Amino acid sequence: MTSASKPLKRHGLELRARLRYLYHGSSPLAVRFRLAVIVIDFAIIGFFIAAPILKEHGRTFYVVDYAIAALLAADLIARISAYSDWKDWFKRPINWIDIVVLGTLLFPTWALNFGFLRILRLWTLLNSDLFWRTVGHKFDNTRVEEITRAMAALVTFVFVSTGFVYSTFRGAHPGINGYIDALYFTVATLTTTGFGDVTLPGPFGRLLSICIMLVGITLFLRLAQTLFRPNKVAYDCEDCGLSKHDPDAVHCKACGNMLCIPDEGA
């Protein structure tokens, strides 16, 4: 190693250590940094939802689009650098979803019909360790987390389906003239209300409607079950490994082992 490359390598290691401190640290500065990242993420997701309407502004839309692409690219590079093993980072499917979202931003014209996939950023954000370590650390492994994840899956599915219907059938069907029409059709189909004023033509349209109904009802039932089923606490049984127990449980229901569940209210 040459003398000139040593300072460069040292600088790279210091930068990685700084990023690891910001993305994984527990100090007030690190928490504020991650909060800022999350707030920006939610603002970007709002832009993604409104994108079909904002595209009418032409050049301004693409300027904002590329600016967001730069932000997300910088965030992804920083997260990879902050991760202890970058190879392990690429093995996680949730990270590949963010890469796909970035691809639709970097090539908006080529990926015009895949822009609806950008809303997947909402699902990856609300299922990320960064979010639960920063905003939801008090509710990690609780009922609140389960409800949030279930709602994120349902909302994401609604907007992904809406975007797909809008990009596929806009102009090809008289009932789909705008984004609101596509959203109306998706919600009416998902809830099986079926007013019939907007229907998709042909076998493909019918198959798509069936998929929206089946997947949408499944996600809705999952949310309902999460909301109304008895509350459980996350505590691993030392003998059988059962991870969910009643808050006041003294013995494990599976094996009868004595439990010692911490009582935060005591």
Image: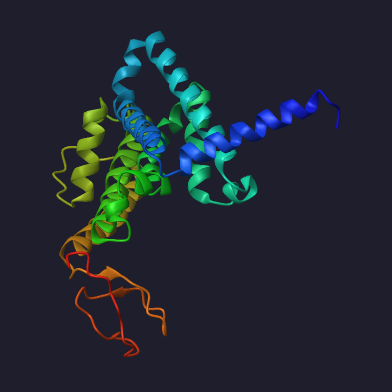
At which x and y percent is residue 181? 22, 31
Quarter where residue 38 is shown:
top left
Q: Which of 55 and 133 is in front in this view?
A: 133
Q: Which residue is drawn at 35% across and 34% down?
A: 32
Q: Nearer the viewer, residue 97 or 250?
A: 250
In this orientation, does residue 107 appear? no
Number of disc labels? 0
The relative height of residue 149 versus residue 63 in the rendered view (above or below) is below
Q: Is residue 171 left or right of residue 17?
A: left
Q: Which residue is drawn at 47% across and 29% down?
A: 72
Q: Residue at x 83, y 26 (%)?
A: 3
At which x and y percent is residue 135? 30, 44
Q: Residue at x 45, y 33 (%)?
A: 114
Q: Name the quarter where the N terminus is drawn.
A: top right
The colour style of the image is rainbow
The residue furthest right is 2
Q: Name the quarter where the C terminus is drawn.
A: bottom left
Q: In this view, does 253 lie to the left or right of 77?
A: left
At which x and y percent is residue 112? 45, 26
At which x and y percent is residue 224? 19, 60
The relative height of residue 24 versus residue 229 in the rendered view (above or below) is above
The residue furthest top is 59
In this orientation, does residue 39 appear? yes
Quarter where residue 80 is shown:
top right
The relative height of residue 62 versus residue 72 in the rendered view (above or below) is above
Q: Which of 191 and 174 is in front in this view?
A: 191
